[in-house]
Image (cartoon, rainbow, N blue to C red):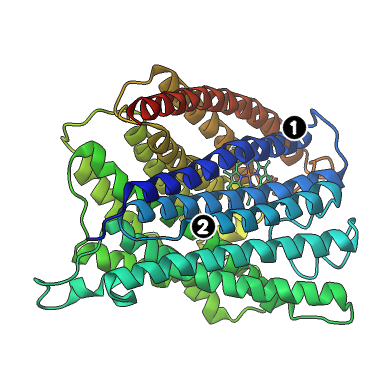
Amino acid sequence: MIQIDSTDIKKQKKLALTWAITFLILFPVLITLGLLMRLRQGEVTEAAPSEFFSYMTLHGLGMAGVLFSFAFAALWYLNSTRYVKLNVKFGWFLYIIIAIGVVGLLIGTLIGKFGPGWYMLYPLPFKGTFWPLWATKLSVISLIILGVGWLVGILHILYALAKEYGGITNLLGWQYLKKDNSNIREIPSMVLITTISLIPGVFALIIGAAMLIMYLLQSFEPSLAFDPLMMKNMVMFFGHTLVNITMYCAVGWVYALLPEFTHREWKVNKAVVYSWNATFFFILFAYLHHLYMDFVQPTSLQYLGQIISYSSAIPATGITMFGVIAQVYHAKMKWSIIPLMFLFGMAGWAIGGFAAVVDSTIALNSSLHNTLWVPAHFHTYMLMGVVLFILGFLYYLFSGNNKEEKDSFGNAGFWIFVLGSYGFLLMFYLGGLNSVPRRYSNYSGIEIDHVRETGVHLAQCAALFVGVLLIGLILMYLSLICRLVQQKATNKKND
Ligand code: HEM
């Protein structure tokens, strides 16, 4: 087992804290954009459609990008301080590259009003637009910069892990499947899940980069044209896979950190290897359920989309839920805020995942497609899944020896945040069930009175719940700051 010296750990921690503070600044800014959208849809405020759609684009791309970047940074930190040497200078270089991409995107959307939504459905960024061409060029270049940063970062982690654990097949846990596995190189569960999450990320980023380069070429040479169906397959493969692996990266650190609270091991075994390897395959094809409405997509792929979407819900979720129950059942543990967040994060993943399976059922998708049910399901597992895992990790990072201490302030913030978030999500689900369409800057153009009025009222209630979740978030921020200050003071005393 590799020894990581304490100076390296300190350097990696500084990098992780910088990522953490960046996340803590950007996250509420992006929530505020979401709040502004709900206020606009609820007719509480007025904003031009161009404003709404540029907010929606920045919010969607920003949230997905910030959550993935932070999940990547957390995995970087945990791997580099436990299992493998990672080059901290390269880590800082990636931070700067990603920051440049974010600044470009902020300018493109907030000043240039680039507003085709996160998926820029081709030929949208070129036809019928209300923003100038420079905003498209800048936003696409910024996304390419982000993609290249993530790609080289992922390759760096995978290369270092493969070198340390004797090759990629060992990282995938295939040594556990041998008949005689008594003398094999064991791997920590987080290393297995890091690998399973990041390899599909490599495919997604390569396809994403190719697609973005095609957009860029057309922005310089307007006579170019590409096949819209191919572009949609590419963008959905890229976006769906990236969001999917953000969840799996976060689950990876729960496997590593929860045992520190339950005092039980969570090791890799054959069942874990089979389940996560099956997930590896399913991640790559689950995106097909985004194309059910595209009648020109070959029918066989539509059936494949349904089968794989159903199958993808089972192995990783099943084995992880079973593992969590085995971890906490009758465990002599203190339910401090960190394991609480991990447990609720699991629940959010399961609830959002179930709503996703409902939507991926072809018969139901024909009613729910492009209604608010779609943001409902992915907001559930991102907000009540990934975000809770991230907050749990931040509490872990910001705490010294007080990880298991009672934190009434933080706990109050946590419960208020959960209450506000589920209230906000419920309004999306009710909107979906009442056929309220997604991506409408306001509902005044809807001719069916019931749908229009329901959409407006639900948006108003959602805005109130966002206010509640923000209060919870502020309380948690204060408790996090207290922990960081306490940790710094203890470190100073010990130095
Ligand atoms: C916590 C507070 C949040 C609020 C108030 C919020 C609000 C919204 C709203 C109002 C929309 C537009 C819905 C529509 O189609 O009519 C939206 C879309 C979206 N949100 Fe959120 N959201 C939040 C959190 C998140 C999180 C954590 C993610 C993480 C990935 C996220 C990702 C997205 C994406 C990808 C879209 C779709 C954008 C598009 O269609 O281009 N949101 N959000």
Q: Is residue 318 visible?
A: yes
User: Which x, y percent locates residue 467?
Assistant: 63, 25
Q: Which residue is mark 1?
A: 39
Quadrant occupied by the C terminus: top left
Residue at left offset 67%, top offset 37%: 29
Q: State which tag comes first along the sequence, 2 or 1.
A: 1
Closer to the camera, 451 or 374? 374
Residue at left offset 33%, top offset 46%: 6
Closer to the camera, 109 or 237? 109
Q: Amino acid at mark 2?
A: Lys
Residue 215 placement, left or right of 340: right
Q: Amino acid at mark 1?
A: Leu
User: Which x, y percent locates residue 191?
Assistant: 32, 61
Q: How many marks?
A: 2
> Would you place residue 263 above or below residue 67 in this image?
above
Q: Secondary structure at mark 2?
A: helix
Closer to the camera, 27 or 373? 27
Q: Which residue is mark 2?
A: 89
> Would you place residue 310 above or below residue 247 in this image?
below
